[in-house]
Image (tube, rainbow, N blue to C red):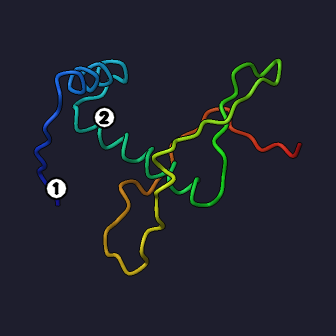
């Protein structure tokens, strides 16, 4: 069952949404928003599980940096009694992801 939602955007935010739709070759702005919610849901889960999000800038040099999303610091675990389904059951595909024990 689909739900309809009306969202008010600033001109800048709407332009960014349009640019993302083109950049991601998404069929609709709704698709961009659904994908963004899936990524945000995944990030929230990882942060709540005390994981760190690491960006590998130059793999050949081992240059990395931690990406911190301060707005996720207020994230809370999903209530098990809550009947809502997560936005996405799938985690985003992470290309070239690997675990290292350093």
Residue in the picture at 43% in, 46% down? 40
In the displayed orientation, state which residue is furthest to the right.
Answer: 102
Residue in the picture at 31% in, 75% down? 83
Q: Residue 100: percent from the left, percent from the top?
A: 82, 42
Mark whose residue sits in front, 2 or 1: 2
**Mark 2 crowdedness (10 Å alpha carbons): few <14, some 14-19, many ≥20:** some
Q: Is residue 42 left or right of residue 14?
A: right
Residue in the picture at 38% in, 61% down? 86
Image quadrant where one finds the N terminus: bottom left
Q: Residue 30: percent from the left, percent from the top?
A: 23, 38
Of the pair 20 and 7, the residue shown nearer to us: 7
**Mark 1 crowdedness (10 Å alpha carbons): few <14, some 14-19, many ≥20:** few
Q: Is residue 87 left or right of residue 59?
A: left
Circle 1: element type: loop
In the displayed structure, 53 sits above or below 84; it is above
Residue, disc 1? 2
Q: Residue 36: percent from the left, percent from the top?
A: 37, 40
Circle 2: element type: helix
């Amino acid at each position: 069952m689909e739900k309809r939602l009306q969202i008010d955007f600033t001109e800048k935010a709407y332009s960014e949404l349009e640019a993302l739709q083109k950049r991601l070759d998404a069929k609709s702005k709704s698709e961009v928003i659904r994908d963004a919610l899936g990524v945000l849901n995944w990030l929230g889960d990882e942060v709540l599980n005390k994981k760190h999000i690491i960006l590998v800038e130059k793999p050949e040099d081992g240059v990395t940096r931690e990406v911190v999303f301060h707005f996720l610091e207020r994230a809370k675990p999903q209530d098990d009694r809550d009947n809502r389904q997560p936005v996405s059951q799938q985690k985003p595909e992470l290309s070239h992801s690997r675990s290292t024990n350093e």
